[in-house]
Image: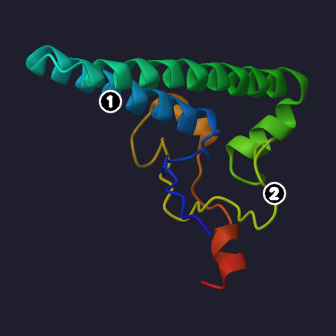
Amino acid sequence: MDAVWVRSVNGIQMHHVTDLQDAGRFLGNAAMALRAAHVRTGTDHYSGIAAELKSLMERVRQLEDEARSKMHDLHSTDPERFARCRDGHEPWPGEIAAGFIPRHTCRDECLYHDHEVLDALMQCTCGQPPCRACEIGGKL
């Protein structure tokens, strides 16, 4: 089974569009580095690989646009489900549901109390029940 690195963001479960953004950015950086190697050395096969990477990057950007569109559609058609997915209570549509564990919330910080964001008073996260992911994993 492949290991997956999941970006930890305080308060939300990232949509897989973020992974596609990372892939596109990494491919773009690799293509740029190969073009720079071509400029420095004049070796043509560097520019050929850079062109392949650019083509692959364009395909990944297309997948990113499709994923973003689906996420926006979910937000407009089912805002309650969007909120459950964003909050990490269920997987995003199109992501594998088997073995899904809710997002760990035990280290979340309150915007109002921990970061003194006065406008966040109504979004206070203090006093929430124990983290469901820890309950499921048996860590409580």
Q: From this view, report whether residue 116 is shown above or below residue 137.
A: above
Does the residue at mark 1 contact the one at mark 2 (Cβ under 8 Å)?
A: no
Query: Is 133 left or right of 34, judged from the image as shown?
Result: right
Q: Looking at the figure, which quarter contains the N terminus?
A: bottom right
Residue bearing mark 2: 97
Residue 18 visible in this rendered orientation of the protein: yes
Pair 1/2: label in front? 1
Q: Looking at the figure, which quarter contains the C terminus?
A: bottom right
Badge 1 local density, few (<14 within 10 Å), some, or many (20+)?
some
Q: Residue at x 68, y 47 (%)?
A: 87
Residue 130 visible in this rendered orientation of the protein: no
Q: What's the amino acid at mark 1?
A: Ala
Q: Secondary structure at mark 1?
A: helix
Q: Position of residue 5 (x, y in %)?
A: 49, 56
Residue bearing mark 1: 30
Furthest toward the front, the residue is: 44
Q: Nearer the viewer, residue 114 or 140?
A: 140
Q: Secondary structure at mark 2?
A: loop
Query: Is 117 left or right of 14, judged from the image as shown?
Result: left
